[in-house]
Image: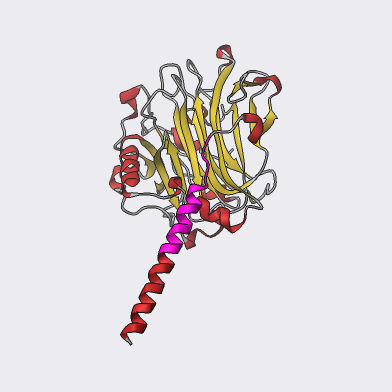
Amino acid sequence: MATTGAAALVALMTTVVSWAAVLAAAAALLDTSPVPFQAGYVPLFGGDNLVRSPDGRSVRLKLDRRTGSGFVSKTAYHHGYFSASIKLPDDHTAGVVVAFYLSNGDVYPGSHDEVDFELLGNRLGHEWRVQTNVYGNGSTSRGREERYLLPFDPTLRPHAYAVAWTPTAVVFYVDGAPIREVVRVPAMGGDFPSKPMSVYATIWDGSAWATDGGRYRVDYAHAPFAADFSGLVLTGCPVAGGARCAVEVMTGEFAVMTPAKRAAMRRFRRRNLLYTVCHDKIRYKGTVFPECDDTDDGGDFHRWGESKRVSASRRGYSQQKPRKDMVVDASSGRPSTWPIGSLRAD
């Protein structure tokens, strides 16, 4: 009997070691090196407002009175790691939106999935902000939006914005540090993005909502606005990638949230989180999204999801305070002039 038990234990240990070796080998196969533009992308719109560098490793997207511009990946991916280093335009950029995102809206116009970085311009002397969105199966009416300040000036040099999308979670990174993790839970149902998506980069006129809820619009006297994209990483599973590719993605370093990563994420969020849907009790009438982390201190947020802790004005960003004489939007319950009042998807 003891011999049988020992043999079973050895067999189990062998299986565990073999599986660990498979996972390690799978992770080692991932290549997160940047690719030349032509290898992974094609122009989407904008004509000569999309300018490739002579070496083909970077692209400049411009917005002027005539048009914005953008590019899209040559193939759709079913999970993966996608990154771009972006240098944003300076000066007066109110109303300008620079986006790096995943979407399948062209294939599923009524039930699309989307995972976004939206970089939102501002008035001269005020900061750019970044917004992340997660939508599944057309769930924009149950938007998973958050907004943040950045701990650096994004107009001075490129910074890396990356999305790790696996069957179990979406993680957003800035310069290699995680800033948001959306873990898939059963109660999310189709709200978690699950269909193959293409990778997009665009610059466009978001005057209707991007800066203080549309109060400050694009001023084309400062055009053209130019955003530089480099370090283009496309480490994903093509639609026909199969189960092996899914294992590679799920065991990649970018997909594993270690204690050190979560600690870094908490620090970033404590210092820079401006708005989170997880504490917006007005827009969603008290709904608590099932994936929200209940360890967050809800006392640090107003009922409309704005942070009480982060003082945006300390770095030049002017945040409007609600007043008694403000007109309230009857549909949302939030003051109609509140900066976050016009959150929406692309």
Relative horizontal placement of residue 221, taking residue 47 as reference (left or right): left
Q: Residue at x 45, y 50 (%)?
A: 182
Q: Is residue 24 magenta?
A: yes
Most extreme residue toward the front is: 3
Query: Against 211, is 20 above or below?
Result: below
Q: Residue at x 53, y 41 (%)?
A: 31
Most extreme residue toward the bottom is: 1
| Residue 37 shows in this picture | yes
Magenta highlight: main SS: helix
- Find residue 238 and report its horizontal and vertical position in percent: 63, 48
Quadrant of the snapshot with the C terminus: top right
Kindly indicate the quadrant of the structure image that contains residue 243: bottom right
Relative horizontal placement of residue 95, taking residue 19 as reference (left or right): right
- Find residue 169 and report its horizontal and vertical position in percent: 47, 52
Q: Residue at x 35, y 42 (%)?
A: 265
The colour scheme used to paint the residues is secondary structure
- Label count reads 0
- Find residue 322 and report its horizontal and vertical position in percent: 37, 33
Residue interval drawn in magenta: 17-33
- Find residue 7 and report its horizontal and vertical position in percent: 37, 78
Residue closer to the observer: 247 or 283: 247
Quadrant of the snapshot with the N terminus: bottom left
| Residue 336 shows in this picture | no
Residue closer to the observer: 207 or 328: 207
Q: Is residue 160 magenta?
A: no
Relative horizontal placement of residue 328, taking residue 140 as reference (left or right): left
Residue closer to the observer: 279 or 80: 80
